[in-house]
Image: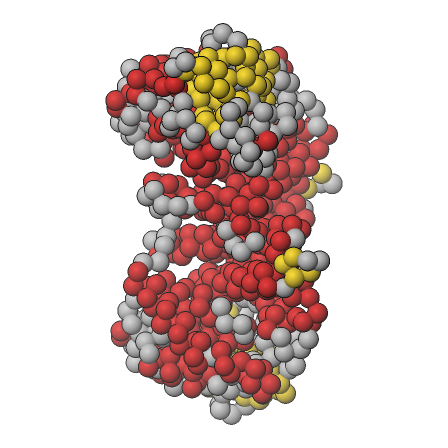
Amino acid sequence: MTPLFAFDAVQEAFRAECRRFLQARALPHIEGWEREGRIPFRELLKEMAAEGLLGMRFSGACGGQGKDIAWHAVLAEELGRIPCGGLGMGITIHHDMVAPLLESCGPGSVGRQALARALRGECLLAHAVSEAGAGSDLGAIRTRLDASAPGFRLTGRKAFVSMGVQADWYCVLAQGPGAGRFPLNMTLALVPRGAPGVRLHPRLATLGHRSMDVCDVEFEGVEIPEGHILGAQGMGYLVQAKQFIEERIISAFRSTATAFYLCEASWAHASRRTAFGKPLAEHQALYFRLAELRARCLLSREANLDALGALLAGVNVETRSAACKYLSCKLVREAADEAVQIFAAAAYVEGHEIERLYRDVRLLSLSTGSEEIMLHTLSALEGMA
Amino acid sequence: MTSFNSLAAFENAWRAFTEDFLAPRQDAWESSGRYPLEDIYREMGGQGLLRATLPVAHGGDGRPAAWDFRGLEILASSGCGAIGMSVATHQQITVPLMLRFGRAAVIGGWMRSAGEGGAIFGLALSEAQAGSDLAAMQTAYRRDGDGFLIDGAKRYVTNGGSAHALCVLARDAGHTGSAVPRATLFLVPMDSPGLTRTPLATMGNRGITAEVALEGVRVPASHALGGEGQGYFIQLSQFPRERLVISVRAAAISRRQLRLALDHCRSRTAFGTPLASNQALRFRYAALSAELGSLECLNRRCEGMLLDQANFTELAAAAKWRGGRLVRETSDFLLQVSGGRGYLEGHDADRAYRDGRAISIAGGTDEMMLEMIARMNGT
């Protein structure tokens, strides 16, 4: 039996760097970001790059550090411990969803140039996949990419684009060119925000992630040069699906870390706060629930580490990825609910950290594959179909 | 004597034992309510399954504990909960305890015999009025010349009916006044005068449990494991390993329930389609499978820490808690998809449902696991 993956001492030292940076540069600003509805991602990413906290998994030729994805998992855990879902989500989109898609582009290509700049924090990458009528069901995407010599033309409307207002590039999944059969009928294109025909709809007010600038982005016959196609024409869905598998593991690390954070915060509060003559933490019904939560955090983290270890070993991780994403996002929303119960009315007041997390973490069960899609994938992979 | 050159060969021998020896006889034993443990252990011993991990000094091959964990998993996959529980108690919980705390002169003969399947052991802790709360136990010992006399009664003793020796926890009769009694763990040969055993009929894991009464049972001083007064310390020190053993079994049992459920859902048709095409069943299956995957990971982590002699007290409690819950959930799922047939006595689902229920109780209840986790985290 091979030992389960564990981070090594160098990676743990890197964790301390991430924590120090985020506590100094993110923690004090969360309330302001939430009020303004915007996180200054480019500025933050520039500082992270300067401190060596970006691009760990990317090769030197791409402007990265030539390490591996385990380092991103460490960063994801530390982002998960910052009580601001928007921050972690934004950096994951930029660094773990779109950037890996750019890495597959050829040397000297537009994608590679964008990647090198993105890893220096000079440009911000957003992902435009969902549509009003196509969420989990990507085959229902209606945004079209059509041949229009010498390149292509993009038409359609993408919904709920995180960082949609401030991003420099949108990575767009569209149908076409041509009329192939799903899943070989989709293409990923890189579209600059300033291109003629790109129109931003008004910012959306959302349940959580209020520090995130979310909007619909419309593409009105935007001209797309051939060099802006990611991967091959018609392969967009498959490239995207493969990237989701890795990104879900990173998101699982972030979710589980937030669950640990909520569990620890709840326990700390329960130890301080007294009711009926003793601390809440000594009321059995409460501490049993917290103990169950803690046990589930421990289980979830081992599932994440196992998926990461398998990914690094080059094993097919489809099952592990779906399982750890499912477990972690379900866990974190239950952890948030438990935290609200322990903190009680205080956590019901807007602006309280637990109130914010309660709203923020709910997105994790919806985005990049809903809980239902994870269960669907798992049962199909195991032959229960 | 049978030796195995590789873990793979050892695992194959376990598979052969479960398929060729256990499987054809299991139903008859189950309905008779009694497993002939002596014959079964002789068979396992003869096939070399019981000596691989014993130290060389005790006639074994000194293989790593991981070998026995894999054996336990194979045994659990066979669906014979009674034998799984019996072997786990003997091989994985009691033998390691005897090896660690017993004097060579006392345990030497027992160990050699155990390797051949000629000696069966068990651990006698619980009493009618003392389960999780061991401090409430009434079984007591007093000095008697160069030995001790033990009086009391132990309940729910796995292997109690067939064991050749039991490790019996008793309190010092002369030590009163403190909340926690002074306790000693004695190695008690079952042919000692004054000792009687009565089989207990149980809901599941039938035919391996007994009640043991001790009336003035005399043991020499050398039989006090780890020395007199060390009983609680020994118990505490072996908890993480015991819980891991149970959790490893729980995961393997759950794996089996899900496999049987999956096979049934694919082959059984209702309303014109296989059961497996029902989304509600698929999602329930997938959720259980994901939970089980995480338990298997946590068990692997604990096993690695056991090997490295690291402290995994909290992780073991979490694993044991999850294992107990998960066996109940997967057994319930298996019963549900099996429908009316699964409710018939003797059906896999019926037995699994009854056998699996013990996991949340034995070796520390779910509630004790949560108490333990809570105390390690600020309660």
Q: Quadrant of the N terminus of chain A?
A: top left
Q: Within the image, what quadrant is residue A129 found in?
A: bottom right
Judge by depth and name the residue closer to the eye, B68 or A169. B68
The residue sitting at 62% across, 75% down in the picture is: A352
Q: What residue do we see at 49% from left, 31% from top?
A: B182
Percent position of residue B207, x then y: 58, 17
- Is residue A309 shown above or below A20? above
Q: Is residue B147 above or below residue A29?
A: above
| Residue A327 found in image quarter | bottom right
Q: Residue B179 at what x, y percent from top left?
A: 56, 37
Q: Is residue A327 left or right of residue B39?
A: right
Q: Residue at x 57, y 46 (%)?
A: B370
Above or below B248: residue B190? above
Between A192 and A2, the residue placed more toward the observer is A2
Residue A44 coordinates in the image, percent (x, y): 43, 83
Q: Quadrant of residue A181?
A: bottom right
Side of B17 where A385 appears, left or right: right
Residue A175 visible here: no
Position above or below: A286 against A250: above
Residue B133 in view of the camera: yes
